[in-house]
Structure formats: C-alpha cells, structure tokens
Image (cartoon, helix red, strand yellow):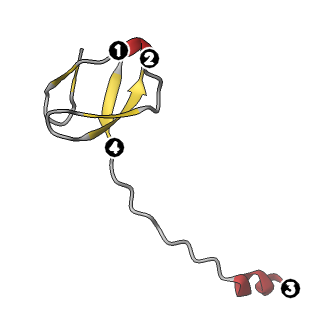
C-alpha cells in the first residue's frame, strides 16, 4: 500500500512488479502518477509538460561561413 501524493488515498499496488519510471493512475482522484523510487516506493504526480516548439532555422547554419 502507498498513499497518493495528490489526494492521500491509499493505492493498493503489487510493488514487486513496479519499476522506476512506470506510470499509473489513482483510482480516487484520477491523477497520473510516476514511480520515482522503488526502495522505498515513491510516487510523484506527472506534470503535463508543455511542448516547446523548437524552431530549427536552416538559415542559421549558413551564418558560420
């Protein structure tokens, strides 16, 4: 058993089958959680990362000449 870091609900998990980096959802609040530690088992909420638009301007490559 582990506690959801978002809503403090108890989550029943088979800790032997989890690996660092796995994701799961809390049944109570629906938060998406990531396993960040195995011994002891630690979860953290997955933050939705804003996708940054990386603009690769091919003309910049010509500046070095």
Q: Dots 1 and 3: beta carbons under 8 Å?
A: no
Q: Is residue 3 above or below residue 53?
A: above
**Mark carried by residue 46:** 4
Disc 4: CA contacts within 10 A as few (<14), some (14-19) or many (>=20): some
**Mark carried by residue 65:** 3
Disc 4 to disc 1, how far (Cα)?
Answer: 20 Å
Disc 1 to disc 2, how far (Cα)?
Answer: 6 Å
In the image, is 31 to the left or to the right of 57?
left
Q: Residue furthest right?
A: 65
Q: Earlier in the sequence, mark 4 or mark 2?
A: 2
For numbered disc 2, what is the local secondary structure? helix
Disc 3: CA contacts within 10 A as few (<14), some (14-19) or many (>=20): few
> Of circles 3 and 2, which is in front?
2
In the image, is 53 to the left or to the right of 12?
right
Judge by depth and name the residue closer to the eye, 27 or 61.
27
Where residue 23 appears, as percent x and y from the top left, is 39, 35
Where residue 55 appears, as percent x and y from the top left, is 58, 77
Q: Earlier in the sequence, mark 4 or mark 1?
A: 1
Q: Quadrant of residue 12?
A: top left
**Mark carried by residue 31:** none
In the image, is 52 to the left or to the right of 13?
right
Disc 2: CA contacts within 10 A as few (<14), some (14-19) or many (>=20): few
Q: Quadrant of the N terminus?
A: top left
> Of circles 4 and 2, which is in front?
2
Q: Which residue is mark 2?
A: 17
Where residue 33 appears, as percent x and y from the top left, is 31, 36
Q: Earlier in the sequence, mark 3 or mark 2?
A: 2
Judge by depth and name the residue closer to the eye, 61 or 10.
10
């Amino acid at each position: 058993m582990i506690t959801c870091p978002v809503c403090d609900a108890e989550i029943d998990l088979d800790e032997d089958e989890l690996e660092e980096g796995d994701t799961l959802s809390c049944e109570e609040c629906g938060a998406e959680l990531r396993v960040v530690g195995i011994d002891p088992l630690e979860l953290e909420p997955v933050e939705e990362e804003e996708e940054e638009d990386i603009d690769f301007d091919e003309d910049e490559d010509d500046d070095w000449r």
